Image (cartoon, grey):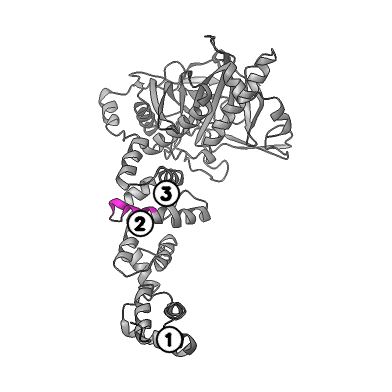
Amino acid sequence: MTAAAQADLLDYDDVIARFDPVLGLEVHVELSTATKMFCPCATTFGAEPNTQVCPVCLGMPGALPVLNEAAVESAIRIGLALNCDIAPWSRFARKNYFYPDQPKNYQISQYDEPIAFDGYLDVPLDDGSTFRVAIERAHMEEDTGKLTHVGGDTGRIHGATTSLLDVNRAGVPLIEIVTKPIEGTGERAPEVARAYVTALRDLLRGLGVSDVRMDQGSLRCDANVSLRPIGQQEFGTRTETKNVNSLKSVEVAVRYEMRRQAAILVEGGKIHQETRHFDEGGFTSPGRDKETAEDYRYFPEPDLEPVAPSEELVARLRATIPELPWLSRKRIQDDWGISDEVMRDLVNAGAIELVAATVEAGASSEQARAWWGNFLVQKANESGVELAALPITPAQVAKVVALVDEGKLSNKLARQVIEGVLAGEGEPEQVMTDRGLALVRDDSLIQTAVNEALAANPDIAEKIRGGKVQAAGAIVGAVMKATKGQADAARVRELVMAACGQA
């Protein structure tokens, strides 16, 4: 945080002593459908700019939208998981505004008739308690394109010399989840904000409706914050910090805005209703004046029919809602007998479902945790991908574990087998065979290697014969090197000791 940003803040304890924070969180979720919301264009992240476009998402005259059925079903499932009522009849609206990243100059969204409304989410907090966040609505809309500002120092339009437009993202299905005003959080407001977005991310991932990659923008949070003097019922003027893209940043942005607004209010100033940008340095900066609904001139979308899901469809989708992720994790944690710290590390690595599937495929929970939580996390980091995106399945990891248990591989050799699977060389047994990695079980071959190592190191051999058994490690190491690590180290040591009369 810059010195200037720090200077205009009130101490957090003073904020809580004087003011009651009220939050409102708006989370935009890109759905992981194969095609866009209203056209058949692909939604692949990172594709060559402006290659996943057509007349519909470019807003060409006469091009008509066609609603994505899979997106509607995902929206209903999200609403059900958030304990919302599902509207028997809802419709789309045009949200009119000009942004250069929206080719049509309007966005197809839902306004006063959303697909899901009036729900809640019981959010687990760090101390094991829960906080109920009321959900106002979850509605369907389309994403905008993406502007990249170059030539400046900040990546923002101010100071940039050129702006580049990529329309690939325009039309990607979005669900916007809007909370009701979140009151009663007190000093825990920043924690509640982070915990809510965390729980929502986990829930959406569990539903399989989005990859919820905040770093790629498929989950974005707008954090509304206002303060009111203790005892006052009327809400204060709010600001909206846009597109906060990490869980920690949500917490930091809320805390900063509380301290910034409080400093203005205690000096007799007024809060300006506006959007604000979050800087990764830990502060917010002014954006633009905040519009009201009237500014957008909503009217019913004339090119799309209303959405009227049948009771049968809603019932079928309700049956697909899984157990809440944090409840599932608690049950798994108890089954595995692991600490909160270990569980948190596995959750942060995105390993829980992978470990559980590996256990289901036959590995012990300890072995599965060791592979996914250590070696494979390292491989994912080296490749710059999510753990689940590695080209190896839980069943394949379980097979590697089985090969170790059967004595066909050591843990060191097993790592090479997994590397072969990741490289696309086939199933674990095939990689083990093709690379010649199976452990040597033939005592005659190991004995030959032991004899050669002893002969090559007579001084060490003499020490072992004289009772300095710790010297055997050097001979074992020489044998393991000669056999390329494929001998059983314990068996090698036994044969070394026997050869030196120390059995």
- Mark toward the start of the polypeptide (2 vs 1): 2
Residue 50 appears at what percent x and percent y?
Answer: 57, 40
Q: Nearer the viewer, mark 1 or mark 3?
A: 1
- Mark toward the start of the polypeptide (2 vs 3): 2
* Secondary structure beneath label 1: loop
Rendered residue at 58%/32% (across/down): 252
Residue 193 appears at what percent x and percent y?
Answer: 50, 28
The Cα–Cα distance between marks 2 and 1, rounded to whole angstroms, is 40 Å
Q: Which residue is mark 2?
A: 367
* Secondary structure beneath label 3: helix
Give amino acid for label 3: Ala
The Cα–Cα distance between marks 2 and 3, rounded to whole angstroms, is 18 Å
Give amino acid for label 2: Gln
Rendered residue at 50%/25% (across/down): 25
**Quadrant of residue 438 within the rendered picture:** bottom left
Predominant secondary structure, magenta span:
helix
Taking the image as shown, residue 152 lies to the left or right of residue 440, namely right
Asked if one can make out residue 142 in the rendered structure from this viewpoint, the answer is no
- Assign the N terminus to one quadrant of the image: top right
Rendered residue at 63%/20% (across/down): 261
